[in-house]
Image: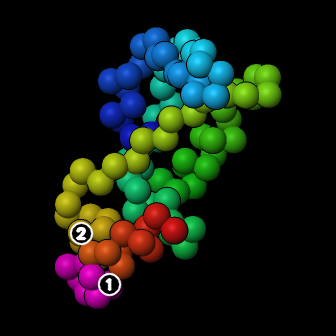
Amino acid sequence: VGDSHVLSLAWQTLRINDINSGTYKLRTATPFPATGVKAYHLRSSMQFFTHYNLHALLRRLPNQGLTRTIILSAGEIDCREGIGGTLLKGYYRSCNEAVEDTVR
Protein backbone atom coordinates (compact mmCIF):
# COMPACT_ATOMS: atom_id res chain seq x y z
CA VAL A 1 0.00 0.00 0.00
CA GLY A 2 1.43 3.37 -0.89
CA ASP A 3 2.21 5.92 -3.57
CA SER A 4 3.01 4.98 -7.17
CA HIS A 5 6.38 3.57 -6.09
CA VAL A 6 4.65 0.44 -4.74
CA LEU A 7 4.25 -0.60 -8.38
CA SER A 8 7.99 -1.35 -8.57
CA LEU A 9 7.45 -4.24 -6.12
CA ALA A 10 4.28 -5.48 -7.82
CA TRP A 11 3.90 -9.24 -8.10
CA GLN A 12 7.34 -9.98 -6.63
CA THR A 13 7.66 -12.90 -4.24
CA LEU A 14 8.87 -11.76 -0.82
CA ARG A 15 10.37 -14.01 1.82
CA ILE A 16 9.26 -12.83 5.27
CA ASN A 17 11.20 -14.36 8.15
CA ASP A 18 9.52 -15.20 11.45
CA ILE A 19 12.24 -14.56 14.02
CA ASN A 20 10.29 -16.40 16.73
CA SER A 21 9.97 -19.73 14.93
CA GLY A 22 12.94 -19.55 12.57
CA THR A 23 10.64 -20.21 9.61
CA TYR A 24 9.55 -17.96 6.80
CA LYS A 25 6.51 -17.27 4.68
CA LEU A 26 6.42 -16.46 1.00
CA ARG A 27 4.16 -13.58 0.09
CA THR A 28 3.32 -12.09 -3.29
CA ALA A 29 3.43 -8.29 -3.28
CA THR A 30 0.03 -7.20 -4.54
CA PRO A 31 0.07 -3.47 -5.30
CA PHE A 32 -2.56 -1.16 -3.82
CA PRO A 33 -1.56 2.33 -4.98
CA ALA A 34 -2.98 5.32 -3.11
CA THR A 35 -2.39 8.11 -5.59
CA GLY A 36 -0.15 10.90 -4.34
CA VAL A 37 0.07 9.78 -0.71
CA LYS A 38 2.99 11.18 1.28
CA ALA A 39 3.91 10.70 4.93
CA TYR A 40 2.75 14.25 5.67
CA HIS A 41 -0.77 13.46 4.43
CA LEU A 42 -1.23 10.69 7.00
CA ARG A 43 -1.42 12.92 10.08
CA SER A 44 -4.74 12.50 11.91
CA SER A 45 -5.44 16.23 11.58
CA MET A 46 -4.97 16.20 7.79
CA GLN A 47 -8.02 16.92 5.65
CA PHE A 48 -6.74 16.17 2.17
CA PHE A 49 -8.01 13.73 -0.45
CA THR A 50 -4.96 11.45 -0.19
CA HIS A 51 -5.64 10.91 3.53
CA TYR A 52 -9.22 9.83 2.85
CA ASN A 53 -8.20 7.87 -0.25
CA LEU A 54 -5.69 5.82 1.77
CA HIS A 55 -8.25 5.01 4.47
CA ALA A 56 -10.78 3.95 1.82
CA LEU A 57 -8.14 1.73 0.22
CA LEU A 58 -7.24 0.12 3.57
CA ARG A 59 -10.91 -0.74 4.15
CA ARG A 60 -10.99 -2.51 0.77
CA LEU A 61 -8.00 -4.77 1.47
CA PRO A 62 -8.83 -8.47 1.43
CA ASN A 63 -9.30 -9.92 4.90
CA GLN A 64 -8.23 -13.52 4.42
CA GLY A 65 -7.51 -15.59 7.49
CA LEU A 66 -6.23 -14.32 10.80
CA THR A 67 -2.91 -12.94 9.63
CA ARG A 68 -1.78 -10.86 6.71
CA THR A 69 1.28 -8.86 5.88
CA ILE A 70 0.89 -5.23 4.84
CA ILE A 71 3.77 -3.00 3.77
CA LEU A 72 2.94 0.70 3.85
CA SER A 73 5.15 2.96 1.73
CA ALA A 74 4.61 6.69 2.13
CA GLY A 75 7.70 8.70 1.40
CA GLU A 76 8.50 12.37 1.17
CA ILE A 77 10.00 12.70 -2.28
CA ASP A 78 8.91 16.18 -3.30
CA CYS A 79 10.64 18.59 -0.91
CA ARG A 80 8.37 21.47 -2.00
CA GLU A 81 5.44 19.91 -0.14
CA GLY A 82 4.72 18.31 3.20
CA ILE A 83 7.35 18.48 5.89
CA GLY A 84 9.84 20.68 4.05
CA GLY A 85 7.21 23.05 2.70
CA THR A 86 5.50 23.64 6.03
CA LEU A 87 8.86 24.13 7.72
CA LEU A 88 9.83 26.77 5.16
CA LYS A 89 6.47 28.51 5.62
CA GLY A 90 7.08 28.75 9.38
CA TYR A 91 4.44 26.31 10.60
CA TYR A 92 7.08 24.54 12.72
CA ARG A 93 10.07 25.80 14.72
CA SER A 94 12.33 22.94 13.65
CA CYS A 95 12.55 20.01 11.27
CA ASN A 96 12.36 17.63 14.25
CA GLU A 97 9.08 19.21 15.36
CA ALA A 98 7.62 18.82 11.85
CA VAL A 99 8.71 15.18 11.63
CA GLU A 100 7.42 14.36 15.13
CA ASP A 101 4.04 15.92 14.32
CA THR A 102 3.89 13.90 11.10
CA VAL A 103 4.74 10.49 12.57
CA ARG A 104 2.73 10.89 15.77
- The magenta segment is 87-94
Q: Say if residue 30 shows up in the picture.
A: no
In the image, is residue 91 part of the stretch drawn in magenta?
yes
Locate residue 6: give its quadrant: top left
Q: 37 or 20, which is in the foreground?
A: 20
Q: Is residue 3 left or right of residue 46?
A: left
* Residue type beneath disc 2: Gly
**Whole-percent x, y for residue 26 in the image:** 55, 12
Name the residue tied to disc 2: 84
Whole-Å distance between the Cαs marked 1 and 2?
Answer: 10 Å
Numbered tag placed on residue 92 in the rendering = 1
The x, y position of residue 8, in whole percent, is 33, 24
Q: Is residue 93 above or below residue 80?
A: below
Q: Nearer the viewer, residue 4 or 67?
A: 67
**Main secondary structure of the magenta stretch:** loop
How many C-alpha atoms fall within 10 Å of the one at disc 2: few (<14), some, or many (≥20)?
some
